[in-house]
Amino acid sequence: MTAFALRFDFRNPEQAGTTTADRYAAALDMAEWADRLGCARITVSEHHGSPDGYLPAPIPMLAAMAARTTNVRFLVAALIAPFHDPLLLAEEMIVLDNLSRGRVDLVVAGGYVHEEFALFGVPMNERAKRVTEVVTTLKAAFTGEEFTYRGRTVRLTPAPFRPGGPSVSLGGSTEPAARRAARIADGFIPSVSEVWEYYRDEVLMLGRPDPGPSPIGRNQVVALAEDPDKGWEQMAPFFLHETNAYGAWQAQDDLAAPFHSVTGADELRESGQYRVLTPERFVAELKSSPRPFTQFHPLCGGMPMELAWSSLRLFEREVLPAFT
């Protein structure tokens, strides 16, 4: 059986023509659908003050999804640490861990969008300090025991459902972030594979087992359509919105990043980062892979719900049966 996952960021630009409430409702339905079909993981992300309504609060979203599902695991990737009170965040994650019965994991990052730091009045040069405090606080709180927080002895209740609580990894795209992850976190999820070797080097220097090669591959969005040219024509405006919105953010500091702004749909299609395939071609590609896996981004860039469901239903009807 091929493994699959879903991710959501809930961009809802004006061209989408939908309400945020309807988009949230559709994602909950999709989570329930995916859980029924054996989905491995659902990932949600966090950004703040985005003109297109990017999800600013992943924890309540995952709480709603947890209530509609039984087995699928959840991942916050990434939670932007500098904007969160560490103790309050720990309590919220513990509640989510209990609601989901231990099905949630967390990737923490320092953030990079200048407008977000201005929104919260947080200096960008405090990112590393705030990330470290959040990670160490979460890991201590998740033990269920007393710990020292800002010079005080504290203990949070209730305890997590899962012993030790959710795993806490770090995300990032720089050498300092990679090395920090090796020192304080449970793992590292790089934005780009090039920085993985810094993490690996630090892990080895700390005397721990080799974590092996980078866990991420090329960032790619795949959708399904019976007519891929027509599907591309319908979906391209939303793919363009996503890549250009991320590209504008990530260009602020010339970051090594998986997204780059493009001038039009033809250029984007040529890049191969967004692909619309027939189910038959997708089956062939998956069968040629030693570890067939795909992560769908069904509401990508404000994708209309009917288009998103069309792609997912083709996966259910014409792809999954090829692996049973």
Image (tube, rainbow, N blue to C red):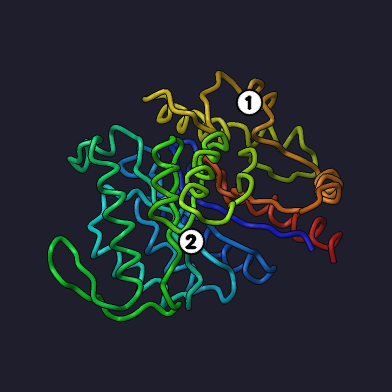
Q: Quadrant of residue 219?
A: top right
Three-letter amino acid code of the residue under disc 2: Ala
Q: CA distance from mark 1 to mark 2?
A: 29 Å
Q: Earlier in the sequence, mark 1 or mark 2?
A: 2
Q: Residue furthest left?
A: 151
Lateral position of residue 275 relative to residue 321, left or right: left
Q: Residue at x 36, y 67 (%)?
A: 93
Mark 2: give few (<14), some (14-19) or many (20+) Cα within 10 Å: few
**Mark 2 highlights which residue?**
25
Q: Position of residue 320 (x, y in %)?
A: 79, 60
Q: Quadrant of residue 50?
A: top left
Q: Secondary structure at mark 1?
A: helix
Label 1 sits on what residue type?
Leu
Instruction: Determine whether 269 is above or below 4 in the image.
Output: above
Residue 248 on image: x %, y %: 42, 26
Disc ID at residue 256: none
**Direction from residue 265 to residue 126 in the image, left or right:** left
Can residue 177 be seen here? yes
Q: Residue furthest top?
A: 263
- Across and down, in percent, residue 78 comes to 43, 50
Residue picked out by circle 1: 268
Q: Residues within 10 Å of mark 1 (few under 14, many from 20)?
A: some
Residue 104, compared with residue 130, is above or below; it is below
Camera-nearest label, 1 or 2: 1
Asked if marks 1 and 2 touch (Cβ < 8 Å), the reply is no
Residue at the image point whose x is 59% and y is 21% from the top: 264
Quarter holding the C terminus is: bottom right
Residue at the spot 45% in from the left edge and 44% down from the top edge:
11
